[in-house]
Amino acid sequence: VEIQPDGTLQPGASWRYHVKPFDGAKVEAASLAVNGIDPWHPLRPAIPEKEALTRLFQDIRRTMKENDCTRAILTGHNAAFDLNFLNAAIARTQIKRNPFHPFSIFDTATLAGVAYGQTVLSKALQAAGIAWDSNEAHSAAYDAQQTAELFCRVCNKMLGTGS
């Protein structure tokens, strides 16, 4: 998220990687049916989990430095789930330099529940006046972008600097 000169927030840069399942991963068929991912497709440009996290953390640390921040805070829709998932991946890959705060999160499900009376992502986005394309839903990149839009909209509304 970037702070604009007028004090409003807007989504900043984003990064995405296709990640190979780690050894012993439990990959649920029902989840794959929802998101349409074939993790073993030969043309999928997937990289190992540790490489993806290393690249991501380098990008995040660079952005933190540019914005004079000392910690990143994970923001997500049901962010506690995401933080647990991330922390498990960090432990599994034995990465030592995690840029994220170990337990603080910004949860858009909670924020949207307060601001708009909606906790389901699609309904919260619609209540906030943000487009929702159900054909794109459950793509990690799309859901993350929409979640960032929602976070900024809620914060701008609460700060009185936006709708």
Image (tube, rainbow, N blue to C red):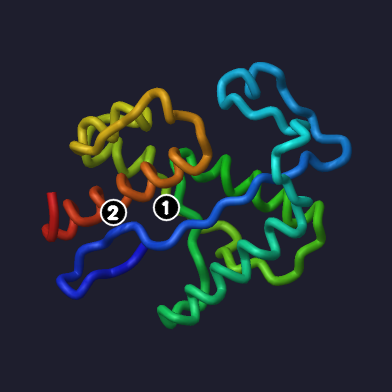
Residue at 70% from the left image edge and 39% from the top image edge: 44
Q: Which residue is mark 2?
A: 152
Q: Position of residue 46 (x, y in %)?
A: 72, 45
Q: Give neighbour class at mark 2: few <14, some 14-19, many 20+ (Cα, 10 Å).
A: many
Q: Position of residue 63 (x, y in %)?
A: 48, 73
Residue, far front = 43
> Residue type at mark 1?
Phe
Numbered label attached to residue 149: none
Say which of 9 and 106 sits in front: 9
Residue at 50% from the left image edge and 30% from the top image edge: 138
Residue at 76% from the left image edge and 43% from the top image edge: 20
Q: Which quadrant of the view contains residue 91?
A: bottom right
Instruction: Give me the C-alpha separation between circle 1 and circle 2.
Output: 11 Å
Say which of 100 and 57 sits in front: 57
Q: Earlier in the sequence, mark 1 or mark 2?
A: 1
Mark 2, secondary structure of its residue: helix
Q: Position of residue 74 (x, y in %)?
A: 50, 56
Quadrant holding the N terminus? bottom left
Residue at 38% from the left image edge and 24% from the top image edge: 134
Mark 1, secondary structure of its residue: strand
> Residue type at mark 2?
Cys
Q: Which residue is mark 1?
A: 106
Q: Give neighbour class at mark 1: few <14, some 14-19, many 20+ (Cα, 10 Å).
A: some
Q: Position of residue 85 (x, y in %)?
A: 65, 44
